[in-house]
Every structure is written in structure tokens, then in C-alpha cells.
Amino acid sequence: MNWDQIEGKWMQLKGKAKETWGDLTDDELDVVAGKRDQLAGKVQERYGLAKDEAERRVDEWSKNV
């Protein structure tokens, strides 16, 4: 799914993101609002990943939703 679609359907996809990244709070996911760079930043911050690794994981997730 492309990021325009993800952003448009974020309320439905937020649950899938929560399943994948359970350490992210609902408030953090609300702030992300389906924006790839913001989701990658939150994943990087929360899980202590390098930027490239966080972006890779977010891209993998987007292919599976």
C-alpha cells in the first residue's frame, strides 16, 4: 500500500501499527497520522534503532498492510 493510501486510512491501520510496534502509545500513533517519516522517527526513538533500520522496518510494514 502506498503512503497516500496509508495516510487516508490511518484510523483503520493504526491498530495494525500498534500490533507491530506495541511500545508506541495511541497518542504517538495519533500524532504520526500515517506519515511515513514521522512513523519511522517514532520507531527509531522508541526502539533505539538506526534511522536506516527504522525506515526499512516501516517500509516492510507498509508492504504488508
Image (cartoon, grey):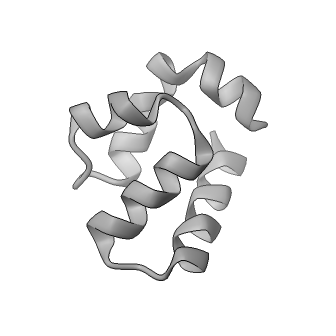
Residue at x-position 78% and y-position 37%: 2
Taking 20 as reference, is 17 above or below it? Answer: above
| Residue 6 pos. (x, y %) | 64, 29
Side of 63 relative to 38 (left or right): right
Say if residue 63 shows up in the picture.
yes
Residue drawn at 48 percent across, 19 percent down: 12
The percent coordinates of residue 27 (x first, y second) are 23, 32
Q: Residue furthest bottom?
A: 50
Q: Is residue 1 visible?
A: no
Asked which quadrant contains residue 19, the reply is top left
Where is residue 16 shown, x and y percent of the image? 44, 37
Which image quarter: residue 46?
bottom left
Q: Outermost residue toward the right?
A: 2
Q: Please say if 41 is above or below 29.
A: below
* The C terminus - image quarter: top right
Give the mark count: 0
| Percent position of residue 33, x then y | 47, 28
Front residue of 15 and 44: 44
In the image, 64: left or right of 38?
Answer: right
Nearer-the-camera pick, 30 or 63: 30
Quadrant of the image for the N terminus?
top right
Q: Is residue 56 above or below residue 59?
A: below
Q: Tell me: residue 20, above or below residue 11.
A: below
